[in-house]
Image (cartoon, grey):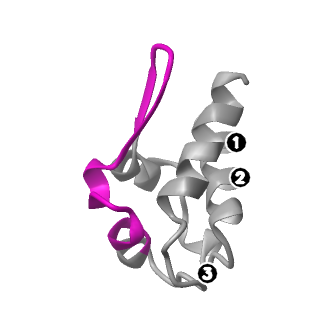
Amino acid sequence: MGVKEDIHTQIVGALAGAKFPIETPETLLGAFPDGAETTCKSGDVELKAGDAGQVLTAEDFPFKSAKDVADVIVERAGL
């Protein structure tokens, strides 16, 4: 599994208990187990949930599933 797929899987897993749709960035951060400090790691790559704010825009919301969140973050993070 590559870094991109690994991080994607970790994001989906971290949001497994989240209630969708998620309407706001604040709600999204609150859905992660450790909030903004939730960290996904693969090899030398480390991505914190709080960093997602740098790649997400208001137009991305609402998110309908954990997969949708992971798709957008992984694509825009340039992994």
- The span shown in magenta is 28-47
Classify mark 1: helix, strand or loop: helix
Label 3 neighbour load within 10 Å: few <14, some 14-19, many 20+: some
Q: Which of the two residues, 25 or 36, is positioned nearer the viewer here?
A: 36
The quarter of the displayed image where residue 28 is located: bottom left
Name the mark nearer the viewer: 2 or 3. 2
Name the mark nearer the viewer: 1 or 2. 2
Label 2 neighbour load within 10 Å: few <14, some 14-19, many 20+: some
Q: Is residue 53 above or below residue 4?
A: below
Residue at the spot x=51%, y=64% of the render? 15
Classify mark 3: helix, strand or loop: loop
- Residue 79 visible, this angle: no
Residue at the spot x=60%, y=56% of the render? 12
| Left/right of residue 5 with respect to residue 27 in the rendered view | right
Which label sits on residue 62? 3
Estimate the spatial distance between the alpha carbons at disc 3 and disc 1, rounded to whole Å: 17 Å
Q: Which of the two residues, 65 or 75, is positioned nearer the viewer here?
A: 65
> Contact (CB < 8 A) between labels 1 and 2?
yes
Residue 34 percent across, percent down from the top left: 27, 57
- Residue 70 visible, this angle: yes
- Disc 1 marks a residue whose amino acid type is Glu
Classify mark 2: helix, strand or loop: helix
The N terminus - image quarter: top right
Residue 49 percent across, percent down from the top left: 39, 51
- Disc 2 marks a residue whose amino acid type is Asp
The quarter of the displayed image where residue 60 is located: bottom right
Label 1 neighbour load within 10 Å: few <14, some 14-19, many 20+: few
- Residue placed under numbered mark 1 in the picture: 75
- Residue placed under numbered mark 2 in the picture: 71
Q: Is residue 15 above or below residue 20?
A: above
